Each structure stands twice: as structure tokens, then as C-alpha cells.
Image (cartoon, helix red, strand yellow):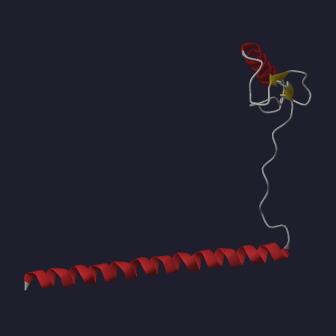
């Protein structure tokens, strides 16, 4: 016994896909109805794959500090960023010195 299930494409829509318990049913007709429903949804404002028509774009979020506490935190963060930049620079130079020393030792060993 094959049962027919109706799966709604959109809660506002009456269109759907008829399918049995194992995906049988409908055939070409249900595929065409699904394609027509998708085309209909794409054509309306706020439909699938389109921005809502008539809705103005949102303004960007303002991330500037608004009170004294946020200003103090922003200053601390900026100072930490500068310190981290200095540390990275020092570590890069230290690694360069270590690699240079290793290459020098290899060259000296090869020349002996």
C-alpha cells in the first residue's frame, strides 16, 4: 500500500510535492510544480535568493567607544597591539639569528 504525503514547499503556499514513503510519486508533474513554486518565490520581494525589496539597507554598526570605560579599554588594547607587534619583530630577528648560526656551522663543517 502506497501512502501519499504532501510536503509543503512554503508555509504560505499551497503548492507541494507528492511523495510516497520511499520518495516515489509525483514524477514530472511534481517536479514542474516545485520549479514553478521556486520561480514564484524568487519573483516576490524577500523571496528565495533575493534581498527584501522596499526594505532599506541597514546602517553599519558604530564601534567607536561611547563612554570613559570603553575609551580606557580601547587605549589598553591599542597599547597591547603595539607590544605584540614589537614581540613579533624580536622573535623574527631571533629566529633569523638562529638559522644564520646553524647555516654558518654547516658551512664551516663542510669546509673542514
Expressed as whole percent of the image width and height from the top left, the position of residue 31 reads 73, 18
Residue at 66%, 74% (x, y): give it.
78
| x then y, percent, for residue 29 | 76, 13
Answer with the quarter of the image where residue 108 lies.
bottom left
How many circles with numbers are drawn on the protein?
0
Horizontal side, residue 91 vs residue 58: left or right? left
The outermost residue toward the top is 29
Name the residue: 27% across, 79% down. 100
Q: Quadrant of the N terminus?
A: top right
Quadrant of the image containing the C terminus? bottom left
Residue closest to the eye, 50 or 80 = 50
- Residue farthest toward the front in the current orientation of the protein: 1
User: Residue 12, relative to residue 57: is it above or below?
Assistant: above
Residue under the point 64% across and 78% down: 79
Q: Nearer the viewer, residue 24 or 44?
A: 24
Residue 39, picture quadrant = top right
Amino acid at each position: 500500500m502506497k501512502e501519499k504525503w504532501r510536503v509543503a514547499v512554503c508555509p504560505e503556499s499551497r503548492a507541494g510535492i507528492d511523495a510516497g514513503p520511499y520518495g516515489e510519486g509525483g514524477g514530472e508533474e511534481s517536479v514542474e510544480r516545485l520549479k514553478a513554486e521556486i520561480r514564484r518565490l524568487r519573483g516576490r520581494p524577500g523571496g528565495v535568493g533575493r534581498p527584501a525589496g522596499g526594505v532599506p539597507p541597514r546602517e553599519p554598526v558604530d564601534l567607536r567607544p561611547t563612554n570613559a570605560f570603553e575609551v580606557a579599554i580601547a587605549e589598553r588594547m591599542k597599547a597591547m597591539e603595539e607590544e605584540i607587534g614589537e614581540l613579533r619583530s624580536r622573535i623574527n630577528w631571533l629566529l633569523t639569528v638562529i638559522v644564520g648560526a646553524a647555516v654558518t656551522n654547516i658551512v664551516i663543517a663542510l669546509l673542514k
